[in-house]
């Protein structure tokens, strides 16, 4: 369990809820189980907090099929955990998001990178913590990085997601959305010798005001992916804010350090509200 899961369990207990923490890694699910039995084991409502995207997604599908309310719903998880689907959802909702080209072979990915222009960014469609998010600085390095990707196993590695490099300050913004509220926001500054701002890569947080502009774009983004408990991430581009990612099982340790709001308590409040319905 990460710091976040421990904090969530603690807050839930403080609020008098019966908490069961379930490790999906040692879980066996039976297709024939009765919904009543599943409710007994899992409770009234499940907060899905798997580190593995695919594991979390499949456990969620199961629990929903057995009649449980899961936060976040399967559909939301599917969109958020997949940057390709997230970009499509944001674009469809008219939310400013970095221009992204998609390609399905190394050859066309090279052309896509040239079309976006250098520097560009190549990202794994499924991934987090900045892992594999690679700057494509010029044609030579782009072609080599794409060729290396081509050698990698896994069907998802043949989906190329190539994005314009946003001219932002050395920081981005992590916001935490709970239902219809932006409860916290934090700047994340990239550490020395690193361009990515992920806290998992040593990024440092600082307080960030929740301006009208930020609140509006963030709530619109949350709605575009289906809503729930989300981490909506934005960058300050020369043209204004752009949303580049929505996280389904959001980490908030860094934001907690600089926020006056008790983030895990707010999340649990929302979960308990849903449990009552
Ligand atoms: N288009 C971009 N322009 C500039 N910086 C970017 C861009 N995309 C990502 N980054 C940087 O890389 C980090 C990781 O990218 P992100 O898309 O959030 O992937 P992950 O899911 O791995 O966190 C971002 O937090 C940001 O600092
Ligand atoms: Mg990110």
Image: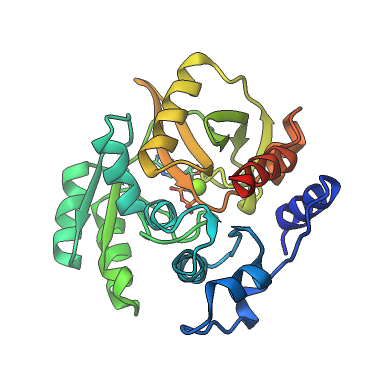
Compared with 207, 4 (above or below) is below
Q: Is residue 258 at least partly visible in the picture?
A: yes
Residue 197: which quarter of the image?
top right
- The tally of labels here is 0
Q: Where is residue 200 in the image (x, y as percent from the top left)?
A: 63, 53
Locate residue 249 relative to residue 156 in the image: left or right: right
Residue 18: which quarter of the image?
bottom right
Compared with 118, 5 (above or below) is below
Looking at the rendered image, the quarter that the N terminus falls into is bottom right
Q: Position of residue 117 (x, y in %)?
A: 22, 42
Looking at the rendered image, the quarter that the C terminus falls into is top right
Q: Is residue 236 at least partly visible in the picture?
A: no
Compared with 197, 156 (above or below) is below
Locate residue 143 relative to residue 1 in the image: left or right: left
Residue drawn at point x = 53 percent, y = 81 percent: 33
Relative depth, front residue between 216 and 123? 216
Residue drawn at point x = 64 percent, y = 82 percent: 26
Color encoding of the figure? rainbow
Residue drawn at point x = 31 percent, y = 44 percent: 87
Locate residue 22 relative to residue 80 in the image: left or right: right
Residue drawn at point x = 63 percent, y = 58 percent: 44
Compared with 9, 166 (above or below) is above
Locate residue 125 relative to residue 46 in the image: left or right: left
Relative depth, front residue between 247 and 26? 26
Q: Position of residue 122 (x, y in %)?
A: 34, 54
Q: Position of residue 144 (x, y in %)?
A: 29, 65
Relative depth, front residue between 229 and 33? 33
Residue at the far top: name it: 212
């Amino acid at each position: 369990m990460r710091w976040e899961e421990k904090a969530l369990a603690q807050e839930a207990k403080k609020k008098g809820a019966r908490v069961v923490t379930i490790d999906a890694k040692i879980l066996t699910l039976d297709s024939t189980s009765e919904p009543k039995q599943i409710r007994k084991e899992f409770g009234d409502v499940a907060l899905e907090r798997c580190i593995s995207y695919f594991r979390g997604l499949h456990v969620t599908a199961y629990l929903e099929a057995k009649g449980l309310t899961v936060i976040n719903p399967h559909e939301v998880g599917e969109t958020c955990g997949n940057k390709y689907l997230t970009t499509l959802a944001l674009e469809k909702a008219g939310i400013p998001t970095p221009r992204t080209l998609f390609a399905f072979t190394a050859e066309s990915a090279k052309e896509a990178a040239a079309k976006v222009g250098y520097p560009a960014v190549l990202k794994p469609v499924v991934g987090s913590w900045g892992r594999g998010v690679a700057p494509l600085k010029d044609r030579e390095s782009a072609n080599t990085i794409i060729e290396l990707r081509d050698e990698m196993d896994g069907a998802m590695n043949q989906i190329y997601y190539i994005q314009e490099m946003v001219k932002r300050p050395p920081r981005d913004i992590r916001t935490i959305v709970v239902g219809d509220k932006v409860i916290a926001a934090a700047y994340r500054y990239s550490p020395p010798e690193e361009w990515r701002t992920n806290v998992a890569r040593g990024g440092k947080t600082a307080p960030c005001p929740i301006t009208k502009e930020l609140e509006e774009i963030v709530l619109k983004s949350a709605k575009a992916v289906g809503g729930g408990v989300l981490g909506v991430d934005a960058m300050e581009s020369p043209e204004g804010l752009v949303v580049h990612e929505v996280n389904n099982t959001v980490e908030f340790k860094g934001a907690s350090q600089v926020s006056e709001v008790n983030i895990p308590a707010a999340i649990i409040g929302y979960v308990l509200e849903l449990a009552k319905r």
